[in-house]
Image: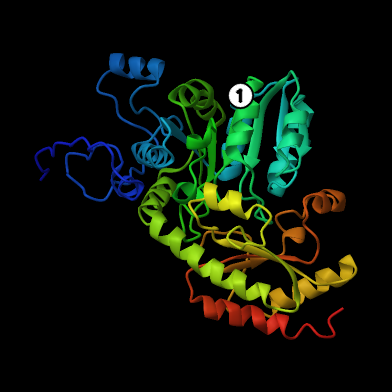
Amino acid sequence: MANPPTPSRDLPEGLHPDTLAVRVAIDRSQYGENSEALYLTSGFVQPDSATSAERFASGQGYTYARTSNPTVTSFERRLAAMEGTEAAIAASSGMGAILLMIMGLLKAGDHVVISRSMFGSTLNLFSKEFAKFGVQTTQVSQTDVGEWRAAVQPNTKLLFAETPTNPLTEVCDIAALAEIAHTAGALLAVDNAFATPVLQKPAELGADIVMHSGTKYLDGQGRVMAGALCGSAQLITEKFAPIVRTAGMVLSPFNAWVVLKGLETLAVRVKAHCEHTLAVARWLEAQPQVARVYYPALPSHPQHELAMRQMNGLGGGVVTFELAAGSPEAARARAFHVIDSCRLLSIATNLGDTKTIVSHPATTSHGRLTEAQRLAAGVSQGVIRVAVGLEHPGDVQADLARGLQSLHGIA
């Protein structure tokens, strides 16, 4: 027996982000569910032909899951509320979101400026795949604002930054890049997957588009793939929604529901990740086998002061370190030894999981780049990335120590 309809109440103004992460969603159904419903359906029954025709023509209402789905809408509204943007649109993965952005904004002859320190697949998508379609790309230093400004051309349509970067956690000045983009009549997009809206809100600093790989911290337990773009209602409605309907990089309702639930605990998880990662980073700095540690909350980080201003005083959940080594072959052998000596940490390439993940970027996330591209991005064979989870940090330290303390004689 169906319950009588439960009236939806408008949320009050001025709610904190932690509250928005729990409460923003579409209206409850007639059953009055407290946990958002999972709508596993590809199609939606229409009351009559005229209504069906109007909905398909206008794009309003639910008609087909490649266009929209109530569960996906809840995820989009919640993420937009947390980022402080008017709207958001979901995609099948983080890379799918970047593909959606490129297809929605760029055409042959357009020019893009990106950081050479970005995720390897992002670099390839811009500089290799879309070069085939006439989109020009210039790669610049992540941290040198002057290089970004000098790279702008009359046909520049987009500046795209990832901050902090993967894996070296370089931080760029979002507000400065926004000024450069807008002066040139271009847009600024920021990949906020590492920081999440808990640590930084790029839109408040002038970014036009905020990109997410929901696969990472937004989910938080390494369960599903998801992506999203956040921005103005006009951008979402006019530029990106038609591409999703046509090209089909749609987020599945189940994945949307998993990430929607992940957002409810995002703030408490991210703060715990930051606390644990700082402890591991400080410990790594004291290890004689480690040549350098990259973590924004450490005073030794080159952009430490900027990061603390821009990232809510916290450093994120990823720490990267470089081993002291000679040749690239020796560096790789030593890095492999440290990684393979771990008995607790997971050897994988995701991040943002409750489980700590260790990886070798030069052969994974940046493995498809040339050696010259890797070195330009600072990713040597001796670099190891640790996405610190929610285990006790002392146990993570002990697992890394097993390999570090047995490096003598390796290569």
Mark 1 residue type: His
Position of the C terminus by quadrant:
bottom right
- Residue that appears at 49% across and 64% down: 273
Residue placed most toward the observer, 212 or 188: 188
Residue at 75% over, 86% down: 406
Q: Is residue 16 above or below residue 269?
A: above
Q: Position of residue 338 (x, y in %)?
A: 72, 76
The colour scheme applied to this rendered structure is: rainbow
Say what secondary structure mark 1 lies in.
helix
Percent coordinates x, y for residue 308 in the rendering? 54, 53
Instruction: Give the quarter of the figure containing the N terminus.
Output: top left
Pinpoint residue 120: horizontal percent, then vertical percent. Answer: 72, 48
* Corner quadrant of residue 325: bottom right
Task: Tell me residue 354's x, y (percent).
Answer: 48, 66
Q: Which residue is mark 1?
A: 182
Which residue corresponds to the image point at 57% horizontal and 59% vertical from the top-left?
351
Left or right placement of residue 246 versus residue 267 in this view? right
As drawn, 374 above or below 148: below
Number of numbered discs: 1
Identity of the residue drawn at 60% across and 72% down: 282
Would residue 339 be visible to someone looking at this image? yes
Q: Is residue 99 visible?
A: no
> What is the quadrant of residue 131 in the picture?
top right
The part of the image, by quadrant, that contains residue 288 is: bottom right
- Badge 1 density bin: few <14, some 14–19, many ≥20, Cα 10 Å: some
Return the residue nearer the eye: 171 or 329. Answer: 171
